[in-house]
């Protein structure tokens, strides 16, 4: 039995096996170091070469971020693919033979490339049609599923959206069917001032117009104002309604600012508010 084991082990060249293993380990270490350096260079190139070359104005900074992050994402996918190919080659696996034998199309389908291709195509059209950019406030809908928030990043496969409570959503581009962009054009800030039914409406009109004439010029984000007058809300509350049209993203600021101004002016004129 001992002679059999000794004879079997003698067939292996231990020194050659150890040498080959050390060479592979050293090659893998060198590969990962090279990959790390190339990834850093690619990221720095996007920031220092691509971004300045775009020459995009301040109002289109979201577009600049979208393109730069999309290019960075594409470079990352390419580098990871090269890394995987090199690792398999160093380990001695016949990658080219496997692809040729199984067929590239069959391997791609097995790896879920159909979904990846759908993500890529949909992401391409989102970019070309400028449906949204980084920093835009959007509502993304797919059937009964709706996600609202701010676009953080857009890649060739997924789009990242952060909602109001801070949750970061990773959405495959193929699942984005309807885009409601709330950061394009003017937005409306509807102000409802609660009033009593016996309030002198002519006096309220006059006070509201005085506040608008005095304060609107101080707020560049407000582009237009419409005084709709007395209304009754769905809950039965009697209100005086004013619509402010503001640049995107400024609705909340304009609402709270002018609601306070209107209420203070009405109280100073002796009008009691509920």
Image (cartoon, grey):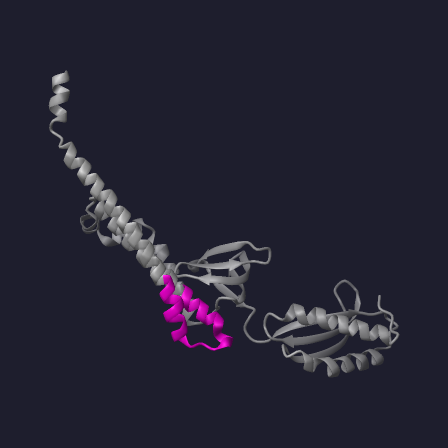
Quarter occupied by the C terminus: bottom right
Q: Is residue 128 left or right of residue 200?
A: left
- The percent coordinates of residue 66 (x first, y second) are 44, 67
Q: Using the rendered image of the protein, determine whether residue 179 is visible from the camera's viewpoint.
A: yes
- Of helix, strand and loop, which mostly describes the magenta segment? helix
Quarter occupied by the N terminus: top left
Q: Nearer the viewer, residue 246 or 197?
A: 246
Q: Is residue 273 left or right of residue 152?
A: right
- The percent coordinates of residue 234 (x first, y second) are 74, 64
> In the picture, residue 123 is in which quadrant?
bottom left
Q: Nearer the viewer, residue 39 or 148?
A: 39
Image height of 8 relative to 73, above or below: above
- Residue 12 belongs to magenta span: no
Image height of 224 relative to 44, above or below: below
Q: Using the rendered image of the protein, determine whether residue 117 is visible from the camera's viewpoint.
A: no
Q: Nearer the viewer, residue 62 or 44?
A: 44
Identity of the residue furthest to the top in this view: 1
What residue is rendered at 34% in x and 62% in y? 42
What residue is rendered at 48% in x and 70% in y? 62
What residue is rendered at 50% in x and 65% in y? 179
Span highlighted in magenta in the image = 43-69
Q: Nearer the viewer, residue 263 or 230?
A: 263
> In the picture, residue 272 is in which quadrant?
bottom right
What residue is rendered at 28% in x and 47% in y? 29
- Residue 62 belongs to magenta span: yes
Image height of 116 relative to 246, above or below: above
């Amino acid at each position: 039995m001992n002679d059999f084991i000794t004879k079997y082990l003698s067939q292996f060249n231990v020194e050659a096996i150890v040498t080959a293993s050390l060479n592979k380990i050293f090659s893998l270490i060198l590969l990962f170091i090279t990959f790390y350096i190339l990834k850093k260079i690619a990221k720095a190139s996007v920031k220092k070469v691509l971004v300045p070359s775009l020459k995009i104005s301040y109002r289109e900074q979201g577009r600049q971020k979208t393109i730069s992050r999309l290019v960075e994402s594409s470079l990352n996918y390419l580098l990871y693919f090269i890394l995987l190919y090199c690792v398999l080659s160093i380990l001695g696996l016949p990658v080219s033979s496997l692809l040729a034998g199984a067929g590239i199309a069959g391997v791609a389908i097995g790896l879920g490339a159909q979904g990846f291709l759908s993500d890529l195509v949909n992401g391409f059209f989102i970019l070309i049609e400028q449906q949204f950019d980084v920093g835009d406030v959007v509502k993304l809908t797919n059937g009964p599923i709706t996600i609202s928030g701010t676009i953080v990043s857009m890649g060739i496969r997924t789009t990242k959206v952060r909602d109001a409570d801070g949750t970061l959503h990773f959405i495959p581009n193929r699942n984005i069917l309807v885009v409601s962009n709330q950061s394009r054009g003017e937005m409306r800030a509807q102000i409802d001032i609660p009033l009593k039914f016996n309030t002198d409406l002519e006096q309220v009109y006059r006070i509201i117009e005085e506040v608008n004439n005095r304060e609107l010029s101080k707020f560049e984000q407000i582009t237009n104002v419409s005084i709709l007058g007395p209304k009754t809300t769905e809950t039965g509350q009697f209100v005086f309604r004013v619509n402010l049209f503001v640049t995107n993203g400024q609705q909340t600021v304009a609402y709270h600012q002018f609601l306070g101004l209107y209420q203070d002016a009405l109280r100073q004129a002796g009008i009691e508010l509920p």
